[in-house]
Amino acid sequence: MNILKNIVSIFVTCGLTLMVMACNELDGDNADFNFEDKVAKEDPARLPNSIRLATYNTHRCAGTGTTVATYDQTAKVISLLDADVVALQELDKNTSLNPTDQLQELANRTGLIPFFCKTVNSGSGEYGIGILSKTTPKITANKELPGVEKRQFLLAEFENYIFIATHFCHLNDVNRQLSFKIITEYILANYADYSKPIYLAGDLNTTSLPANALESWEVISSSANTFPGKSIRIDYILVYKGNSPKYERLRTLVPTYEGIDLQRVSDHLPILVDLKKETL
Protein backbone atom coordinates (compact mmCIF):
# COMPACT_ATOMS: atom_id res chain seq x y z
CA MET A 1 0.00 0.00 0.00
CA ASN A 2 2.87 2.39 0.85
CA ILE A 3 4.49 1.62 -2.51
CA LEU A 4 1.20 2.52 -4.29
CA LYS A 5 0.97 5.79 -2.34
CA ASN A 6 4.53 6.67 -3.30
CA ILE A 7 3.83 6.04 -6.99
CA VAL A 8 0.70 8.25 -6.90
CA SER A 9 2.65 10.98 -5.12
CA ILE A 10 5.36 10.91 -7.78
CA PHE A 11 2.79 11.26 -10.60
CA VAL A 12 1.05 14.18 -8.87
CA THR A 13 4.34 15.96 -8.27
CA CYS A 14 5.40 15.52 -11.90
CA GLY A 15 2.03 16.80 -13.12
CA LEU A 16 2.26 19.94 -11.00
CA THR A 17 5.82 20.53 -12.16
CA LEU A 18 4.76 20.33 -15.80
CA MET A 19 1.88 22.75 -15.18
CA VAL A 20 4.20 25.29 -13.55
CA MET A 21 6.71 24.97 -16.38
CA ALA A 22 3.96 25.53 -18.93
CA CYS A 23 2.69 28.60 -17.09
CA ASN A 24 6.19 30.00 -16.84
CA GLU A 25 6.51 29.84 -20.63
CA LEU A 26 3.69 32.43 -20.99
CA ASP A 27 4.52 36.13 -21.32
CA GLY A 28 2.28 36.96 -18.39
CA ASP A 29 0.36 39.81 -20.11
CA ASN A 30 -2.76 37.81 -21.05
CA ALA A 31 -2.17 38.85 -24.66
CA ASP A 32 -3.75 35.63 -25.90
CA PHE A 33 -7.04 36.29 -24.08
CA ASN A 34 -9.72 38.70 -25.25
CA PHE A 35 -11.17 40.37 -22.18
CA GLU A 36 -13.19 42.91 -24.18
CA ASP A 37 -16.00 40.53 -25.02
CA LYS A 38 -16.25 39.54 -21.34
CA VAL A 39 -17.09 43.11 -20.24
CA ALA A 40 -20.75 44.04 -20.51
CA LYS A 41 -21.51 47.43 -22.05
CA GLU A 42 -23.92 49.46 -19.96
CA ASP A 43 -27.28 49.97 -21.64
CA PRO A 44 -27.53 53.71 -22.42
CA ALA A 45 -31.34 53.69 -22.53
CA ARG A 46 -33.17 56.24 -20.37
CA LEU A 47 -33.87 55.15 -16.82
CA PRO A 48 -37.51 55.21 -15.70
CA ASN A 49 -38.86 58.42 -14.16
CA SER A 50 -35.80 60.44 -15.13
CA ILE A 51 -34.70 63.70 -16.69
CA ARG A 52 -31.68 63.39 -18.97
CA LEU A 53 -29.08 66.10 -19.56
CA ALA A 54 -26.31 65.76 -22.14
CA THR A 55 -23.47 67.61 -23.81
CA TYR A 56 -21.77 66.88 -27.12
CA ASN A 57 -19.06 68.70 -29.04
CA THR A 58 -20.13 68.05 -32.63
CA HIS A 59 -16.84 69.09 -34.32
CA ARG A 60 -18.94 70.80 -37.02
CA CYS A 61 -20.76 67.47 -37.47
CA ALA A 62 -17.57 65.90 -38.86
CA GLY A 63 -15.62 62.89 -37.64
CA THR A 64 -12.05 62.77 -36.39
CA GLY A 65 -9.57 63.90 -39.03
CA THR A 66 -12.13 65.17 -41.53
CA THR A 67 -14.13 68.33 -42.27
CA VAL A 68 -16.92 66.57 -44.16
CA ALA A 69 -20.19 67.05 -42.26
CA THR A 70 -22.50 64.05 -41.85
CA TYR A 71 -25.75 65.39 -40.40
CA ASP A 72 -27.58 62.06 -40.45
CA GLN A 73 -24.89 60.44 -38.31
CA THR A 74 -24.66 63.33 -35.84
CA ALA A 75 -28.44 63.48 -35.58
CA LYS A 76 -28.57 59.73 -35.02
CA VAL A 77 -26.22 59.99 -32.04
CA ILE A 78 -28.24 62.89 -30.61
CA SER A 79 -31.47 60.92 -31.05
CA LEU A 80 -29.95 57.91 -29.33
CA LEU A 81 -28.88 60.13 -26.43
CA ASP A 82 -32.60 60.77 -25.90
CA ALA A 83 -31.86 63.80 -23.71
CA ASP A 84 -34.43 66.31 -22.56
CA VAL A 85 -31.82 68.96 -23.31
CA VAL A 86 -28.38 68.71 -24.87
CA ALA A 87 -25.62 71.32 -25.08
CA LEU A 88 -23.82 71.33 -28.44
CA GLN A 89 -20.51 72.94 -29.36
CA GLU A 90 -18.66 73.74 -32.60
CA LEU A 91 -21.57 74.51 -34.91
CA ASP A 92 -21.42 76.34 -38.24
CA LYS A 93 -24.17 78.56 -39.54
CA ASN A 94 -23.92 79.44 -43.23
CA THR A 95 -20.13 79.45 -43.35
CA SER A 96 -17.99 78.88 -46.43
CA LEU A 97 -17.01 75.47 -45.05
CA ASN A 98 -20.59 74.49 -44.24
CA PRO A 99 -23.06 76.74 -46.08
CA THR A 100 -26.06 75.67 -44.01
CA ASP A 101 -27.48 76.10 -40.53
CA GLN A 102 -26.03 73.03 -38.84
CA LEU A 103 -28.14 73.28 -35.69
CA GLN A 104 -31.31 73.55 -37.78
CA GLU A 105 -30.20 70.53 -39.83
CA LEU A 106 -29.89 68.56 -36.59
CA ALA A 107 -33.22 69.87 -35.31
CA ASN A 108 -34.95 68.80 -38.52
CA ARG A 109 -33.59 65.28 -38.16
CA THR A 110 -34.18 64.85 -34.42
CA GLY A 111 -37.43 66.74 -33.91
CA LEU A 112 -35.85 68.77 -31.12
CA ILE A 113 -36.17 72.54 -30.63
CA PRO A 114 -33.01 74.53 -31.56
CA PHE A 115 -31.44 77.57 -29.92
CA PHE A 116 -28.23 78.91 -31.48
CA CYS A 117 -25.70 81.33 -29.99
CA LYS A 118 -22.99 82.85 -32.18
CA THR A 119 -19.53 83.15 -30.66
CA VAL A 120 -17.58 84.45 -33.69
CA ASN A 121 -18.02 85.33 -37.35
CA SER A 122 -16.59 82.61 -39.55
CA GLY A 123 -16.17 82.31 -43.31
CA SER A 124 -18.97 84.78 -44.22
CA GLY A 125 -21.19 83.07 -41.65
CA GLU A 126 -21.34 82.32 -37.94
CA TYR A 127 -19.81 79.76 -35.61
CA GLY A 128 -20.92 78.95 -32.09
CA ILE A 129 -22.82 76.80 -29.63
CA GLY A 130 -26.39 75.63 -29.31
CA ILE A 131 -29.04 73.83 -27.33
CA LEU A 132 -31.52 71.22 -28.54
CA SER A 133 -34.43 70.50 -26.21
CA LYS A 134 -37.65 68.50 -26.14
CA THR A 135 -39.67 71.39 -24.70
CA THR A 136 -39.53 75.14 -25.23
CA PRO A 137 -37.74 76.94 -22.38
CA LYS A 138 -39.46 79.76 -20.53
CA ILE A 139 -36.61 82.12 -21.40
CA THR A 140 -33.17 82.01 -23.03
CA ALA A 141 -30.25 84.36 -22.49
CA ASN A 142 -26.60 84.57 -23.45
CA LYS A 143 -23.53 86.47 -22.36
CA GLU A 144 -20.00 86.86 -23.69
CA LEU A 145 -17.11 85.06 -22.03
CA PRO A 146 -13.36 85.72 -22.39
CA GLY A 147 -11.30 83.78 -24.89
CA VAL A 148 -8.46 84.08 -27.36
CA GLU A 149 -11.34 83.17 -29.66
CA LYS A 150 -14.51 84.81 -28.26
CA ARG A 151 -16.79 82.58 -26.22
CA GLN A 152 -20.37 82.69 -24.90
CA PHE A 153 -22.70 80.90 -22.57
CA LEU A 154 -26.30 80.14 -23.52
CA LEU A 155 -28.86 79.80 -20.72
CA ALA A 156 -32.27 78.12 -21.03
CA GLU A 157 -34.72 78.14 -18.13
CA PHE A 158 -37.16 75.24 -18.01
CA GLU A 159 -39.98 74.61 -15.57
CA ASN A 160 -37.95 72.62 -13.06
CA TYR A 161 -34.32 73.54 -13.77
CA ILE A 162 -31.96 75.93 -15.54
CA PHE A 163 -29.53 74.61 -18.15
CA ILE A 164 -26.44 76.51 -19.28
CA ALA A 165 -24.47 75.46 -22.37
CA THR A 166 -20.97 76.71 -23.05
CA HIS A 167 -17.57 76.12 -24.66
CA PHE A 168 -14.58 77.56 -22.81
CA CYS A 169 -11.34 78.94 -24.25
CA HIS A 170 -8.85 76.20 -25.05
CA LEU A 171 -5.67 78.32 -24.99
CA ASN A 172 -5.69 80.14 -21.67
CA ASP A 173 -6.48 78.84 -18.19
CA VAL A 174 -7.05 82.38 -16.89
CA ASN A 175 -9.89 82.75 -19.40
CA ARG A 176 -11.46 79.54 -18.14
CA GLN A 177 -11.26 80.75 -14.54
CA LEU A 178 -12.84 84.06 -15.52
CA SER A 179 -15.57 82.24 -17.42
CA PHE A 180 -16.62 80.36 -14.29
CA LYS A 181 -16.56 83.63 -12.35
CA ILE A 182 -18.73 85.42 -14.93
CA ILE A 183 -21.31 82.63 -15.03
CA THR A 184 -21.45 82.37 -11.24
CA GLU A 185 -21.86 86.13 -10.88
CA TYR A 186 -24.61 86.08 -13.51
CA ILE A 187 -26.49 83.47 -11.49
CA LEU A 188 -26.10 85.49 -8.28
CA ALA A 189 -27.39 88.61 -10.04
CA ASN A 190 -30.37 86.97 -11.73
CA TYR A 191 -31.25 83.75 -9.88
CA ALA A 192 -30.20 84.33 -6.27
CA ASP A 193 -33.67 83.49 -4.95
CA TYR A 194 -34.21 80.42 -7.19
CA SER A 195 -34.34 77.01 -5.53
CA LYS A 196 -34.46 75.00 -8.77
CA PRO A 197 -31.21 73.25 -9.81
CA ILE A 198 -28.89 75.10 -12.19
CA TYR A 199 -26.77 72.92 -14.48
CA LEU A 200 -23.74 73.86 -16.57
CA ALA A 201 -22.75 71.66 -19.51
CA GLY A 202 -20.17 71.80 -22.25
CA ASP A 203 -16.63 71.45 -23.48
CA LEU A 204 -14.65 73.19 -20.75
CA ASN A 205 -11.28 72.48 -22.39
CA THR A 206 -9.53 71.43 -19.20
CA THR A 207 -8.73 68.17 -17.47
CA SER A 208 -8.65 69.87 -14.07
CA LEU A 209 -11.29 72.38 -13.05
CA PRO A 210 -9.98 75.52 -11.29
CA ALA A 211 -10.39 75.81 -7.54
CA ASN A 212 -12.66 78.84 -7.83
CA ALA A 213 -15.06 76.76 -9.91
CA LEU A 214 -15.30 73.95 -7.40
CA GLU A 215 -16.25 76.40 -4.67
CA SER A 216 -19.56 77.01 -6.46
CA TRP A 217 -19.96 74.01 -8.77
CA GLU A 218 -19.94 70.22 -8.42
CA VAL A 219 -19.18 67.82 -11.25
CA ILE A 220 -22.00 65.28 -11.68
CA SER A 221 -20.89 63.70 -14.96
CA SER A 222 -18.72 60.69 -15.69
CA SER A 223 -14.95 60.79 -15.22
CA ALA A 224 -14.49 58.71 -18.39
CA ASN A 225 -12.51 60.16 -21.29
CA THR A 226 -14.50 62.36 -23.67
CA PHE A 227 -11.70 63.35 -26.08
CA PRO A 228 -10.31 60.07 -27.44
CA GLY A 229 -7.53 61.67 -29.47
CA LYS A 230 -5.66 62.49 -26.26
CA SER A 231 -7.47 60.08 -23.91
CA ILE A 232 -8.63 62.89 -21.64
CA ARG A 233 -11.86 64.24 -20.17
CA ILE A 234 -12.66 67.85 -21.10
CA ASP A 235 -16.47 67.70 -21.36
CA TYR A 236 -18.54 68.07 -18.20
CA ILE A 237 -21.95 68.50 -16.63
CA LEU A 238 -21.98 70.36 -13.32
CA VAL A 239 -24.56 71.57 -10.82
CA TYR A 240 -24.46 74.93 -9.03
CA LYS A 241 -24.05 74.47 -5.26
CA GLY A 242 -24.85 78.01 -4.18
CA ASN A 243 -28.61 77.51 -3.78
CA SER A 244 -28.38 74.04 -2.16
CA PRO A 245 -30.33 72.41 -5.00
CA LYS A 246 -32.54 69.39 -4.49
CA TYR A 247 -31.63 66.74 -7.04
CA GLU A 248 -30.76 63.05 -7.22
CA ARG A 249 -28.34 61.70 -9.79
CA LEU A 250 -29.33 58.24 -10.95
CA ARG A 251 -26.53 57.61 -13.41
CA THR A 252 -23.89 59.23 -15.59
CA LEU A 253 -22.36 57.71 -18.67
CA VAL A 254 -20.19 58.24 -21.72
CA PRO A 255 -22.38 55.99 -23.86
CA THR A 256 -21.50 53.56 -26.62
CA TYR A 257 -23.91 52.45 -29.33
CA GLU A 258 -23.81 49.19 -31.22
CA GLY A 259 -22.87 49.65 -34.86
CA ILE A 260 -21.71 53.28 -34.46
CA ASP A 261 -18.07 54.33 -34.38
CA LEU A 262 -18.47 57.59 -32.48
CA GLN A 263 -15.04 58.82 -33.57
CA ARG A 264 -16.32 58.84 -37.15
CA VAL A 265 -19.11 61.20 -36.06
CA SER A 266 -17.07 63.70 -33.99
CA ASP A 267 -13.67 64.00 -32.35
CA HIS A 268 -15.46 64.17 -28.96
CA LEU A 269 -17.71 61.67 -27.21
CA PRO A 270 -21.12 62.62 -25.80
CA ILE A 271 -21.76 62.52 -22.08
CA LEU A 272 -25.08 62.19 -20.25
CA VAL A 273 -26.56 62.38 -16.76
CA ASP A 274 -29.88 60.88 -15.64
CA LEU A 275 -31.62 62.67 -12.75
CA LYS A 276 -34.58 61.52 -10.75
CA LYS A 277 -37.60 63.33 -12.17
CA GLU A 278 -39.69 63.70 -9.04
CA THR A 279 -36.93 65.54 -7.17
CA LEU A 280 -36.56 68.31 -9.75
Image: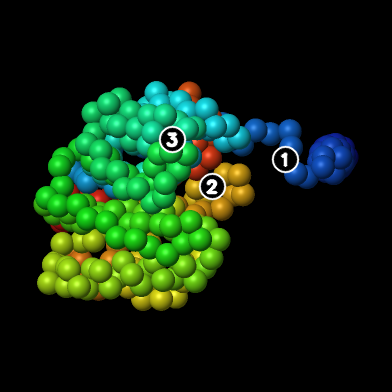
**Mark nearer the N terminus (3 vs 1):** 1
Farthest residue in the front direction? 124
Q: Which amino acid, mark 1?
A: Asn
Where residue 101 sits in the image (x, y, percent)? 34, 32
Q: Nearer the viewer, residue 93 or 209?
A: 93
Q: Nearer the viewer, residue 263 or 167?
A: 167
Q: Which amino acid, mark 3?
A: Thr
Does residue 2 appear in this view?
no
Tell me where residue 184 sits by quadrant.
bottom left
Residue receiving disc 2: 227
Where residue 46 sits in the image (x, y, percent)? 28, 38
Does residue 182 appear in this view?
yes
Q: Give the quadrant of the N terminus.
A: top right
Q: Assess disc 2: are there few (<14), some (14-19) or many (≥20) residues with their C-alpha within 10 Å of its C-alpha.
A: many
Q: Which amino acid, mark 2?
A: Phe
Residue drawn at point x = 23 percent, y = 61 percent: 198
**Mark nearer the N terminus (2 vs 3):** 3
Q: CA separation, marks 1 and 2?
A: 28 Å
Residue receiving disc 3: 95
